Image (cartoon, helix red, strand yellow):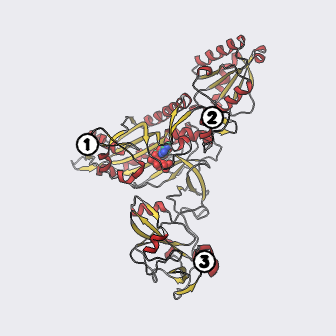
């Protein structure tokens, strides 16, 4: 492909509104164009790369016995009402009406549609297991589209769904899919951590996310450097430092004028933070909920939301607190009425806590559970944080930020029950099918791969997903001898199956080299009048500082050698994944 004819306009300057390296570089290299917030046109460079990512995913899905299907983006709202996910997803769901006023949605995911396919095709246990996948466009009205392809409102996903007669069969497929995901990410040049994840509103049994470590990521993973524990912070467990224990003393009201925040309160009364309790007042779908937790810990709102099965959870406003008879800043579980009280398990461990008195300017010392207050439920509702203990081995947890590139769930029978997708067992009894689902962000992988593989000059494409293999740069491209030699190089590489972007533009060497570095194809071949005099070309890997001169007869073998080196070396700028956290054999 001749660059002079190729739809690609590079930018010298960073675009002002790009918030991450991959977003900035994809715009600068002319890979894509924004159409409206979170929606992009993929120009030839991006599309070539996306097609390669898709091909890798297809190979791995087919190898895991997946069968490819394609479901529609346009779906009837009724289907979503049957599983109540129209409510669960809320404003994320794009809705529209057709000319007959029928309500439709643009699919954000496809559990409902695939379950109706399985329902129509599976009747007996002999038809199971079944593993179906598609690569398709998804629509989500994300509250904050950001970072280019990382979080779009229209994006491509590979979503797979498996159907089984029982949990054991699901286990087998789940492990195969996890392994397939590992293969996909490795082949795309992405180091990932497989971590335990929250299974969300629908609630399945097991769920794992594949997180690519990156400072710009929105997810936090807690992992133990000592053992193989790794979990998304939303769902992680941890061992917290113990609160002081002692004989319960009588409850005592103390004056604490103007002292509200936990550190100030602890200092004022000369107790450690972990000997205080705080009471947080929430509104969950209109209900009022008081959460009591130790002062040094934070409420994990994802755990809370899941426990309450709430669609909408937020902290109550000062006005709402007052209206409920509470005194903001001095809120107390003691004597709380009219709201359900949930206690984190931390409040039941330790004695003589300091807690609000529900009276302006006063706290109580020596509050003890359950003597002075009780709760409707006691549960693990605290956010796990770096520095706390690993729940498996007691090591010290550390935090890693990252981007979620894939997510696998054991769904169980939630959808098959809601949609009545059943099969007959050997005795003729009907059961709902057991399901798994498996998602990979195809467009997000491209952004994540660039986030992971770049330097200050531009992108460094991992060879398997690069839009072209070779950037052939002709210097003094208006020189007839250079042209003839470059065309020969292009033809010879093409004959070997290499994809070549031939920079035939009449531009300065500086402009050409800058563009080549920005675009970051794995191997650059330079033809110049000076090289021609010696009958050589310069060949350089984008990852290397320096190139080397090679005679024409060594052209193909040198390119092959460098691409191979790249394939084997591809990646980690961040440390490799820790030991494999699932009980399947570690790859390679
Ligand atoms: P996130 O937590 O990032 O919002 P999610 O948990 O909602 O993602 P899933 O429903 O698990 O996402 O979707 C499967 C995969 O699709 C994700 O692992 C991610 O790679 C990709 N994905 C999800 N939302 C987006 C988006 N808005 N833009 C691009 N890719 C996305
Ligand atoms: Mg997810």
Horizontal and vertical percent position of residue 317? 48, 67
Viewer-nearest residue: 428 or 433: 433
Marks 3 and 2 sit apart, C-alpha to C-alpha, by 52 Å
Marks 1 and 3 sit apart, C-alpha to C-alpha, by 65 Å
Decide: few, some or many residues near mark 3? Use Cα within 10 Å; few <14, some 14-19, many ≥20: many
Viewer-nearest residue: 526 or 310: 310
Q: Residue furthest left?
A: 428
Give the number of the disc on residue 28: 2
In this rendering, the answer to whether 241 lies above or below 397 is below
In this rendering, the answer to whether 480 lies above or below 44 is above
Q: Nearer the viewer, mark 1 or mark 3?
A: 3
Q: Nearer the viewer, mark 1 or mark 2?
A: 2
Q: Confirm whether residue 178 shows in the render.
A: no
- Which residue is depicted at the point 74% across and 33% down? 545
Label 3 beta carbon within 8 A of ligand 1: no
- The answer to whether the residues at label 3 and label 2 have Cβ atoms under 8 Å apart is no
State the SS at label 1: loop
In this rendering, the answer to whether 547 lies above or below 390 is above
When asked about the image quadrant of residue 511, the answer is: top right
Marks 1 and 2 sit apart, C-alpha to C-alpha, by 54 Å
Viewer-nearest residue: 480 or 233: 480
Horizontal and vertical percent position of residue 379? 45, 68
Decide: few, some or many residues near mark 2? Use Cα within 10 Å; few <14, some 14-19, many ≥20: many
- In this rendering, would 46 be left or right of 376? right
In this rendering, the answer to whether 368 lies above or below 445 is below
Residue on which the image places disc 1: 124
Give the number of the disc on residue 265: 3
State the SS at label 2: helix
State the SS at label 3: helix
- Which residue is depicted at the point 65% across and 32% down? 11
Quick one: quadrant of the N terminus? top right
- In this rendering, would 66 be left or right of 209? left
């Amino acid at each position: 492909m001749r660059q002079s004819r190729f739809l690609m306009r590079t930018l010298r300057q960073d675009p002002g509104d790009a918030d991450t390296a991959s977003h900035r570089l994809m715009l600068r290299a002319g890979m894509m164009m924004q159409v409206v917030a979170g929606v992009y046109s993929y120009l030839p460079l991006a599309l070539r790369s996306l097609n390669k990512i898709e091909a890798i995913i297809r190979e791995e899905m087919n190898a895991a016995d997946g069968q490819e299907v394609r479901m529609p983006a346009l779906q009837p709202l009724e289907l979503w009402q049957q599983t109540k996910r129209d409510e669960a997803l809320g404003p994320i769901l794009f809705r529209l009406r057709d000319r007959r006023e029928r309500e439709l949605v643009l699919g954000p995911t496809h559990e409902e549609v695939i379950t109706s396919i399985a329902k129509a095709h599976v009747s007996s246990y002999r038809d199971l297991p079944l593993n179906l996948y598609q690569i398709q466009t998804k629509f989500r009205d994300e509250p904050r589209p950001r970072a280019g392809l990382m979080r779009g409102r229209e994006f491509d996903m590979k979503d797979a769904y498996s159907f089984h007669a029982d949990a054991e069969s699901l286990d087998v497929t789940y492990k195969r899919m996890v392994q397939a995901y590992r293969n996909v990410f490795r082949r795309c040049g992405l180091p990932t951590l497989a971590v335990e994840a929250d299974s969300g509103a629908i609630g399945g049994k097991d769920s794992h996310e594949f997180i690519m470590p990156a400072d710009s990521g929105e997810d936090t993973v807690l992992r133990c450097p000592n053992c193989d524990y790794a979990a998304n912070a939303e769902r992680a467990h941890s061992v917290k430092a113990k609160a002081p224990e002692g004989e319960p003393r009588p409850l005592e009201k103390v004056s604490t004028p103007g002292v509200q925040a936990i550190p100030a309160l602890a200092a004022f009364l000369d107790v450690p933070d972990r000997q205080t309790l705080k009471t947080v007042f929430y509104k969950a779908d209109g209900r009022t909920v008081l959460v009591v937790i130790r002062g040094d810990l934070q409420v994990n709102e994802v755990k809370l939301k899941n426990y309450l099965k709430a669609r909408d959870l937020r902290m109550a406003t000062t006005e709402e607190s007052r209206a409920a008879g509470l005194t903001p800043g001095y809120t107390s579980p003691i004597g709380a009425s009219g709201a359900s009280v949930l206690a984190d398990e931390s409040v039941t461990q330790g004695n003589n806590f300091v807690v609000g008195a529900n009276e302006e300017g006063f706290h109580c010392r020596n509050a003890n559970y359950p003597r002075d207050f009780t709760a409707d439920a006691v549960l693990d509702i605290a956010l796990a944080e770096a520095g706390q203990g690993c729940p498996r081995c007691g090591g010290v947890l550390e935090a890693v930020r990252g981007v979620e590139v894939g997510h696998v769930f054991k769904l169980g029978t939630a959808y098959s029950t809601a949609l009545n997708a059943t099969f007959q067992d050997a005795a003729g009894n009907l059961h709902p099918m057991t399901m798994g689902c498996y998602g990979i962000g195809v467009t997000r992988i491209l952004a994540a791969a660039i986030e992971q593989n770049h330097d200050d000059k531009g992108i460094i494409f991992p060879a398997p997903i690069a839009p072209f293999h070779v950037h052939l740069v002709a210097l003094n491209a208006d020189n007839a001898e250079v042209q003839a030699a470059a065309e020969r190089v292009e033809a010879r590489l093409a004959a070997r199956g290499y994809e070549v972007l031939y920079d035939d533009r009449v531009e300065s060497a500086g402009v050409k080299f800058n563009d080549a570095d920005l675009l970051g194809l794995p191997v650059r071949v330079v033809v110049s009048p000076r090289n021609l005099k010696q009958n050589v070309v310069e060949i350089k890997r984008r990852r290397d500082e320096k190139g080397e001169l090679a005679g024409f007869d060594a052209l193909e073998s040198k390119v092959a050698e460098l691409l191979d080196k790249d394939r084997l070396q591809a990646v980690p700028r961040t440390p490799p994944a820790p030991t494999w956290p699932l009980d399947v054999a570690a790859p390679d």
